[in-house]
Image (tube, grey):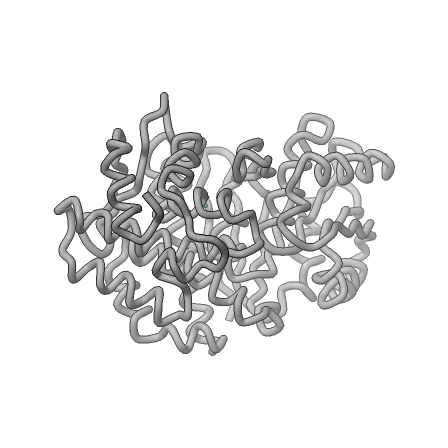
Amino acid sequence: MTASVTVDLAGRPYEVVIGRGLIEEAGTHLKPLLRRPLVSVVMDTVVAGLHGQRLLDGLRSNGISAHAITVAPGEGAKSFEGLSALCDKLLALELDRSDMIVAFGGGVVGDLAGFAAAIYKRGVDFVQVPTTLLAQVDSSVGGKTAIDTPRGKNLIGAFHQPRLVLADLAVLDTLPAREMRCGYAEVLKYGLLGDPPFFDWLEKHAADVLAREPGAMAHAVRRCVEMKAVIVGQDEREGAGRALLNLGHTFAHALEVEVGFGEGVKHGEAVGLGCAMAFRLSAKLGLCADQDAGRASAAVAAAGLPTRLCEIGGPPLAAAALLGHMIHDKKSEGGELTFILTRGVGKAFIAKGIEPAVVSDFLISEGALP
Ligand code: GLY
């Protein structure tokens, strides 16, 4: 069954369509949005091999021609070099400002192609066709686009909303198990930040979602998208409420910069660990019960995701280095540390001005080197 969730942005609403077989139907969904029957599909070489032909056929069967643009797989593509190469290809194709870019892939391709769409000739329309669980429940919805720099993740980017998101659950059938777990970390994040009944449901159905049981997957993706649509509809540019979606991310981004993007730790793994740590920090500060922190950690562990720093491979992590990355995170303001902390499951809030010494002590208590 196909579901549709509206992201209700004033004057610019768009649909997130969730169902099976949407890639084959892509032409039907895209056609009303096009000024001429031509799109440029950006995908990595892995997605191109697995699903590219089906998407191109799905477009052509509706009379839509497609330029296929492939990029290298992996987080490395989300760089100035990757952006420059992609923009050059778009320019060589002589796309004009009324043309459409289709971001067909996981979070990396969505962020990269979305950012290219935001800046190509000062902005062209784009559509997200996310092929990972993580991209379907989070990164493809809400218009955040960006590239990384060696100084941090997503530091250069733009808000640029897609015209449409097509989340085809059937593509998740070929997703490697590690990528499913990474996406599931973001799924848990939604329950932990604001929906206790959903978190209860996830505690019972984690194995079904991870095993890609169609009904469980459809429910999980739809609930996350519904929550994200409400949050983004109320706060598109992260003035306040949208920041709740960063639960676990202050820790996660610091870990990713320290360990190396996509190398020892994947984004979803860092987010799962970051959520467990945010709950433990909240418990340590007396904000939430130890029992809630225990539930958060148990749910992350039940998905086979790391819950402790020592489970991340590589040399031991130093508290000072992690703290330094947090201070330089784009969410810190005037050097003030901002965390998403919580008063319990489903009760996350924005906590500004957390003392660096408090965070350092906490990181050491978590096993980081002093
Ligand atoms: N992934 C967090 C956000 O879209 O705001």
Residue 281 or residue 82, whichever sits in front: 281
- Residue drawn at the location 72% of the way across and 55% of the way down: 44
Indicate the quadrant where residue 237 lies.
top left
Horizontally, residue 268 falls left or right of residue 307, namely: right
In the rendered image, residue 295, in percent from the top left (x then y), is placed at 23, 64
In the rendered image, residue 310, in percent from the top left (x then y), is placed at 38, 59
In the rendered image, residue 322, in percent from the top left (x then y), is placed at 40, 41
Indicate the quadrant where residue 223 lies.
bottom left
- Residue drawn at the location 39% of the way across and 31% of the way down: 327
Q: Please determine whether, in this image, residue 331 is positioned above or below residue 74.
A: above
Q: Quadrant of the C terminus?
A: top left
> How many marks can you see?
0
Q: Residue furthest top?
A: 334
Horizontally, residue 309 falls left or right of residue 51, namely: left
Residue 259 or residue 231, whichever sits in front: 259
Q: Please determine whether, in this image, residue 224 is positioned above or below residue 298.
A: above
- Residue drawn at the location 30% of the way across and 46% of the way down: 363
Horizontally, residue 348 falls left or right of residue 291, namely: right
Q: Please determine whether, in this image, residue 5 is positioned above or below residue 7.
A: below
Horizontally, residue 157 falls left or right of residue 250, namely: right
Q: Please determine whether, in this image, residue 54 is positioned above or below residue 119.
A: below
In the rendered image, residue 30, in percent from the top left (x then y), is placed at 68, 52
Residue 292 or residue 149, whichever sits in front: 149
- Residue drawn at the location 46% of the way across and 37% of the way down: 9
Indicate the quadrant where residue 168 lies.
bottom right
